[in-house]
Each structure stands twice: as structure tokens, then as C-alpha cells.
Image: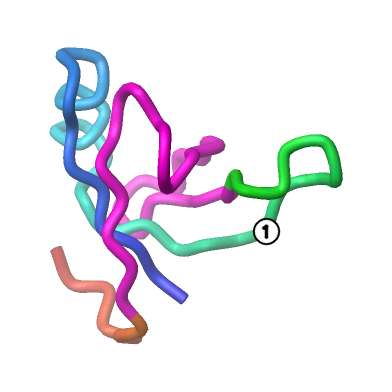
Amino acid sequence: MFVTLKGKTNHGKNRVHENGNKWEVIDHASELQPQKLFVRSTLTWDARWVDPLFDRNFEVEFNNESNTSQ
């Protein structure tokens, strides 16, 4: 599964600029924070945790496409 990240803050916008907006979902969070997703950039392989509902740096859009073009 893939997600598209859009920066909301300057930090988020910089990460999208550096690593692209297409990210692959690698893992779901632990029992302590079940809503978070571990994602990896399809452009640079940078990885991070994001919260699809309440992330302060990113808006997260889900898509099921397998195309990783930027």
C-alpha cells in the first residue's frame, strides 16, 4: 500500500521536497499507538512514523496504486 504525503508545516514541506510525496507503508504501529504507520519514501528510502489522522507535519492520503513514479 502507498500513501501520498503533503506537508502542513515547514518541517513537513521540507521532508516532502527532499524525499518526494509517494511513500510505501512498511508497517503498522504497536499496540501503544495503533493508528500510526511506518512509511518509507519511494525516492530516497527515508523512513518515518506518521499518524494519518493527527500528524502535525503531514496530511496523509491513501492510495493502492503500485506505480512509484514521482
The crowding category of the residue bearing disc 1, from other C-alpha atoms within 10 Å (few below 14, some 14 to 19, many at least 20), is: few
Of residues 22 and 35, the one nearer the viewer is: 35
Residue type at tag 1:
Asp
Q: Give the structural element (helix, strand or loop) at label 1.
A: strand
- Residue placed furthest toward the right: 31
Residue 43: in magenta span: yes
- Residue placed furthest toward the front: 53
- 15 sits to left or right of 26: left
Residue found at x 31% / y 76%:
63
Q: Is residue 7 above or below residue 10?
A: below
Residue found at x 47% / y 76%:
1
- 3 sits to left or right of 7: right
Q: Position of residue 27 (x, y in %)?
A: 67, 58
- 47 sits to left or right of 3: right
> Which residue is identified by label 1?
27
* Range of residues picked out in magenta: 37-63
Of residues 69 and 54, the one nearer the viewer is: 54
Of residues 47 and 55, the one nearer the viewer is: 55
Residue 57: in magenta span: yes
Q: Position of residue 56 (x, y in %)?
A: 34, 23
Of residues 57 and 35, the one nearer the viewer is: 35
